[in-house]
Amino acid sequence: MKHVRGPLCSIDVGERTAETEDIDDLLESYIGGRALGTKLAHDRIPFDADPLGSDNRLYFATGPMQYSTMSFTGRMSATGLSPLTDGLLSSNAGGFLSRNFTGTGYSAVEITGASDELVIVHVTDEGVEFEAVPELEEATVPETCEYLEDEHDLGSEHTTVIGPAGENDVRFASIMTSEERAFGRGGLGAVLGSKNVKAITFDGDSTTEIEIPPLQMEIHGEAANSDSPMRDQGTTSVAEYANMVEALPSYYFSELSFEGIEGVSGDRVEEKKYKKGTCSSCAFACKLPTRDEESGLETEGPEFETLMAFGPNSGVDDIVDVMKSNKLCDVYGLDAISCGDTVAAYLASEDEFGNVDLIHDLVEKIAYREDVGDTLAEGVDRVHEELGVENWSVKGMEFAAHDGRTLNGQGLAFATSNRGADHMYAEFYPYEYPLVDADDAFDKSGLEGKPPKVVELENINAIKDSAVFCKFSRDFLSEERMETLLDADYDELLALGGEVVAMERHFNNQRGFDRSDDRLPYELPEFEQGLDEYYAERGWNDDGTVPEARFESGSGAAPADD
């Protein structure tokens, strides 16, 4: 099986130390990326750790495909204990960071401890340096990137940065790279903030040679010549269709379609797109650099999920207003999905849908935890009762689009996801839109035949997050192609993906998660039977826990201090 190479670099930001450790045995079994990060986190983070405490650890890792020049490989993974969900979670980001990370020569980087002052950590193939930067306290993401460019000649493609939201422990703070790409979901930016780490940079010329089959160039050529609408409109190309089939959450999930969709459709986004945007080595180029000529506003996006959260779900029908919300989230370092949904919850509580001035003010207040922003920074799960609204979250994570009340298989996938209500964990929704071959499609209603498919998709997505492949490679990566590129049987890959999902679940079980957390804020037909079938397919207990025999050694870490 193809896997990354190189030692683990373990950095204690409290002690200002960095050590390297040979982990070849893990690399041979866990590929890289999410699988490697999950194995390290499962064995090294105490089961009772505080997500915002010094015992939490954060792992950055690429996979073997970042040593190729193939399209769909400009991504990397981050893993840690989530301040939002209180469970083990991986997030990944695109952009241009991954190749610079491989240049350090490390297979993974571990951040642990907590600094007593704000620091930047510089990781190179020659070692690790710590730089105190008190002058960057509460600096925005662009301001921090400008500092790194001016003082260290490091472009944003070398950086992971948090904004004020991360420093202020906003539970859905993101880690930003390439300035406008995000390790978005789950609040890992707050983990860095709790450790007093403003940024981590990666640079070097020690990329290991990993032989990737010539198939990579065939896929690269197909990406360059694809006629996919995503190349013009990104993920917003699905917006009007989702609206038509009533799978587009609107007005804080009170409706399933939005009468103002024309004003925030993929066509409107395409009209504002002023150049092509891509990730490292990718010819598919589905990103969305957008500009409003009248106001001069420039941002990247919004993608469909951000469009949903700050558009229909907030009662907003002007794409420029959504672009500004998107920009503010990038500037302050916020997950745009969770932030938009939380803002929408407040709008529902105050009957202020469509009030764009209030929306933009709330985003800033959340980032700095000012006034009501201090409340909203906790996320929907923790504040819905105070606001007097329904709890639209799963395991503490706010919902993405592709509504499960219409797309019932995606609803089940939201419930079973270890990460919470995130659409990319299983990515079931395409199989309930008529966007795939008829043999692979499901009727959107009901759960018949869907639990085994949810399991398969969760498993293979864990492998994509480990390799690391972009999820939008799905039309270009057949089972046979994955086998060729990773030098492994498809069943072997599925089995490893299942182990990754089980490790996440097992860690979370030790923190009290069980079947009662696999819940939705709405009813689905035969949902309990669907859960039973899902657990049986995985070989888990009926209560949603992983049999202890699967992980007899438990966590490799000692319990956190009281």
Image: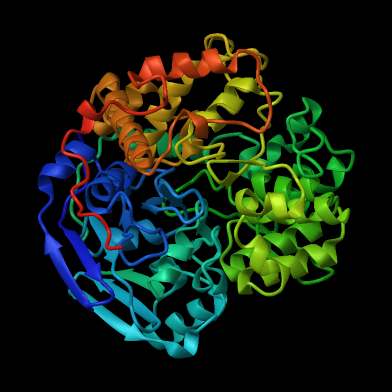
Residue ranking furthest to the front? 562
Percent x, y of residue 504: 35, 39
In the figure, residue 203 lies in which quadrant?
bottom left
Q: Is residue 341 visible?
A: no
Percent x, y of residue 382: 61, 53
The residue located at (28%, 19%) in the rendering is: 491
- Up-down: is 548 above or below 274? above
The quarter of the picture where the C terminus appears is bottom left
282 and 104: which one is in front?
104
Tally of numbered discs: 0
Percent x, y of residue 383: 66, 54
Q: Is residue 351 left or right of residue 549?
A: right
Q: Is residue 119 left or right of residue 337?
A: left
Q: Is residue 467 left or right of residue 253?
A: left
414 and 554: which one is in front?
554
464 and 211: which one is in front?
464
Percent x, y of residue 306: 67, 50
The quarter of the picture where the N terminus appears is top left
